[in-house]
Image (tube, grey):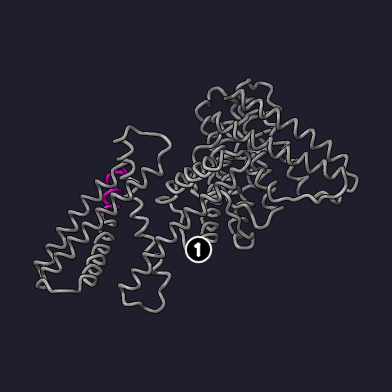
């Protein structure tokens, strides 16, 4: 796998050389977008880094290249078009090879899906905060680079540590600044993700220097603690604000919070893979499949939320106004149902021997189980209401609606109680259903006591 990544990197470097040759052959420079030259310059610096773990960076550059179009004119311009197409293909191969070799980042603390573009004016405040944070870290890195160059007593490991930091940080900053300065609407997903990765890189550097304090130069330990560390929180905070505001702008009726986000991303990934397989596994269209999968998942969720909001609206007498409040309540109920489905799917996955590549199938089975359980509970409640009212003839639809409304209210209270129980237990993985059962018993006991009092 690593050999494949190295070969793909060499292929991308050769494609860059051919692109430069085609670029020099273009006589009329005005036919080449200035932004294309900037993207290529950053791409060259990115591919030149000694490490191969630049998958996120390459994918971010590919996204920028995909938004450009070259005019068809003279032969030299056509050559540049072909060279650009070859370069895009080579970069895509490098990104895929790097992912297979394990160079792709696996941790995403932002839970923001790729491909979100938002007009820069709508996210001006977090963008400005990110710019200030980056302006603060650049002189720190420059100072470390100069001090390292003047440190005659530095050992090879320290040299490699500082070189790795400076190379990788510079590439991330270059791409962020490229995106911020040349594209509108802005690829806010890529900017936020790269900024968060930059914060993680700096944090890792500080941790390494701290743990190896007796094996690095004293000045490096001092700079890591006094200069680098303060920049981490500013960059991370700006990235988080950017991702949060961008999601709100792009999806005004949808929240990618921590409860929903990580699961959504996995479901989108599985859906994109399924679409890719169904269409013959074509190369070079990963962004297209991700976008299609994300649109499908979002449409499905929005449909469920809209359906639940309409039910709440009817149950409450079709009130005027308060649509945002109804939508928020509906989204909360759907999100809670998804939490239960996710935990049930996890149980099924364990019971079936932890199979790979079946997340959508297991999700569907879990959803069916949860829906069967919900219908059973509504049926029991409706039957109880029917008995309490003297077993009247007719009116079954009204009884069912009342029962469903009561179960929704009970589930809401149970969810809130289950969440508190889950927090008290230390947020355990895979025990949401257990917390739910405990909460359900407590809510049922509370309701029974209230009935006796009344």
Disc 1 target residue: 252
Is residue 98 shown in magenta? no
- Magenta span: 418-429
Q: Residue at x 30, y 52 (%)?
A: 419
Q: Residue furthest bottom?
A: 320
* Image position of 413 (left or right of 267): left
Task: List x then y, in percent, for residue 304.
Answer: 40, 60
Q: Residue at x 26, y 67 (%)?
A: 405
* Image position of 149 (left or right of 124): right
Of residues 333 and 427, the one drawn nearer to the viewer in this rendering: 333
Assign the N terminus to one quadrant of the image: top right
Assign the C terminus to one quadrant of the image: bottom left
Q: Residue at x 25, y 51 (%)?
A: 436
Of residues 324 and 404, the one drawn nearer to the viewer in this rendering: 404
Disc count in the image? 1
Task: List x then y, in percent, for residue 333.
Answer: 34, 60
Task: List x then y, in percent, for residue 329.
Answer: 36, 64
* Image position of 414 (left or right of 292): left
Task: List x then y, in percent, for residue 18.
Answer: 80, 34
Of residues 229 and 352, the one drawn nearer to the viewer in this rendering: 352
């Amino acid at each position: 796998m690593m050999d494949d990544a190295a070969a793909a990197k060499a292929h991308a470097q050769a494609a860059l050389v051919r692109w430069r040759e085609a670029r020099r052959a273009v006589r009329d420079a005005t036919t080449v977008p200035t932004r294309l030259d900037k993207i290529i310059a950053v791409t060259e610096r990115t591919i030149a880094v000694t490490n191969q773990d630049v998958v996120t960076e390459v994918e971010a550059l590919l996204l920028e290249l995909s938004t450009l179009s070259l005019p068809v004119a003279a032969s030299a311009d056509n050559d540049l078009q072909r060279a650009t197409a070859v370069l895009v293909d080579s970069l895509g191969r490098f990104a895929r090879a790097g992912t297979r070799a394990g160079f792709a980042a696996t941790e995403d603390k932002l839970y923001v899906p790729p491909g979100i573009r938002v007009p820069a004016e709508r996210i001006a405040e977090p963008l400005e905060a990110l710019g200030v944070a980056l302006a603060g870290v650049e002189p720190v890195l420059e100072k470390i680079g100069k001090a390292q160059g003047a440190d005659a007593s530095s050992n090879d490991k320290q040299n490699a540590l500082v070189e790795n930091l400076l190379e990788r940080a510079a590439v991330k900053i270059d791409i962020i600044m490229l995106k911020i300065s040349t594209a509108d609407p802005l690829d806010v997903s890529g900017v936020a993700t790269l900024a968060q990765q930059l914060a993680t890189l700096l944090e890792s550097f500080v941790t390494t220097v701290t743990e190896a304090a007796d094996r690095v130069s004293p000045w490096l330990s001092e700079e890591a603690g006094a200069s680098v560390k303060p920049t981490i929180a500013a960059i991370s905070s700006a990235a988080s604000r950017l991702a949060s505001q961008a999601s709100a702008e792009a999806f005004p009726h949808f929240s990618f919070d921590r409860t929903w986000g990580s699961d959504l991303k996995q479901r989108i990934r599985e859906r994109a893979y399924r679409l890719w397989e169904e269409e013959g596994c074509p190369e070079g269209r990963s962004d297209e499949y991700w976008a299609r999968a994300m649109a499908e998942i979002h449409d499905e969720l929005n449909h469920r939320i809209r359906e639940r909001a309409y039910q709440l609206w009817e149950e409450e007498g079709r009130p005027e106004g308060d649509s945002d409040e109804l939508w928020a309540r509906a989204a909360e109920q759907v999100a809670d149902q998804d939490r239960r489905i996710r935990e049930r799917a996890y149980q099924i996955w364990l019971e079936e021997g932890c199979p790979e590549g079946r997340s959508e199938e297991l999700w569907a089975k879990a959803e069916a189980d949860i829906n069967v359980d919900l219908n059973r509970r509504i049926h029991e409640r409706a039957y109880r209401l029917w008995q309490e009212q003297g077993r009247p003839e007719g009116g079954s639809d009204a009884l069912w609606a009342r029962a469903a409304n009561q179960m929704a209210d009970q589930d809401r209270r149970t969810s809130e109680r289950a969440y508190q129980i889950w927090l008290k237990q230390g947020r355990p993985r895979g025990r949401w259903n257990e917390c739910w059962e405990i909460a359900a018993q407590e809510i049922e006991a509370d309701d029974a006591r209230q009935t006796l009092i009344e």
